[in-house]
Image (tube, rainbow, N blue to C red):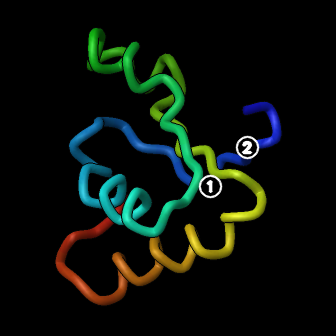
């Protein structure tokens, strides 16, 4: 996992629920770092540094395209 790169940071798990499904459908290797800790202590999200979306280097381009498409073509915005 040390090779994975952070491409987005979220405050709460609800902000990326749809994104997770899209990544799983596209078989993009990813991990949401700090997800469990913030699930337990949601008001500490900013202090912890948020939930970091980390993606394998080989999948970064496709992951960024999915993020851009989601922001551009729908009312579901990634914050």
For this orientation, the residue located farthest to the left is 75
Q: Is residue 49 above or below residue 10?
A: above
Q: Quadrant of the N terminus?
A: top right
Residue at point 73% right, 43% down?
A: 4
Separation of disc 2 and disc 1 at Cα?
A: 9 Å
Q: Classify 10 Å Cα crowding around label 1: few (below 14), some (14-19), many (20 and above).
A: few
Q: Tell me if 26 is positioned left or right of 56 in this view.
A: left
Residue at point 40% right, 26% down?
A: 35
Residue 42 position, x and y percent, is 27, 19
Q: Which mark is residue 29?
A: none
Q: Is residue 38 above or below residue 28?
A: above
Residue at point 25% right, 50% down?
A: 17
Query: Observer-nearest residue: 63 or 43?
Result: 63
Residue 37 position, x and y percent, is 40, 13
- Give the labeled residue for mark 1: 7
Q: Secondary structure at mark 1?
A: strand
Q: Secondary structure at mark 2?
A: loop
For this orientation, the residue located farthest to the right is 3
Marker count (numbered): 2
Residue at point 46% right, 75% down?
A: 66
Q: Quadrant of residue 79?
A: bottom left
Q: Tell me if 55 is positioned left or right of 67 in this view.
A: right
- Give the labeled residue for mark 2: 4
Query: Observer-nearest residue: 25 or 66?
Result: 25
Residue 57 position, x and y percent, is 77, 57
């Amino acid at each position: 996992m040390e090779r994975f790169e952070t491409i987005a940071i979220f405050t709460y798990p609800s902000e990326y629920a749809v994104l997770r499904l899209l990544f799983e459908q596209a078989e993009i290797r990813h991990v949401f770092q700090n997800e469990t800790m913030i699930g337990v202590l949601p008001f500490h999200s900013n202090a912890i540094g948020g939930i970091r979306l980390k993606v394998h280097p080989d999948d970064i381009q496709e992951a960024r395209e999915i993020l851009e498409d989601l922001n551009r073509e729908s009312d579901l915005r990634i914050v």
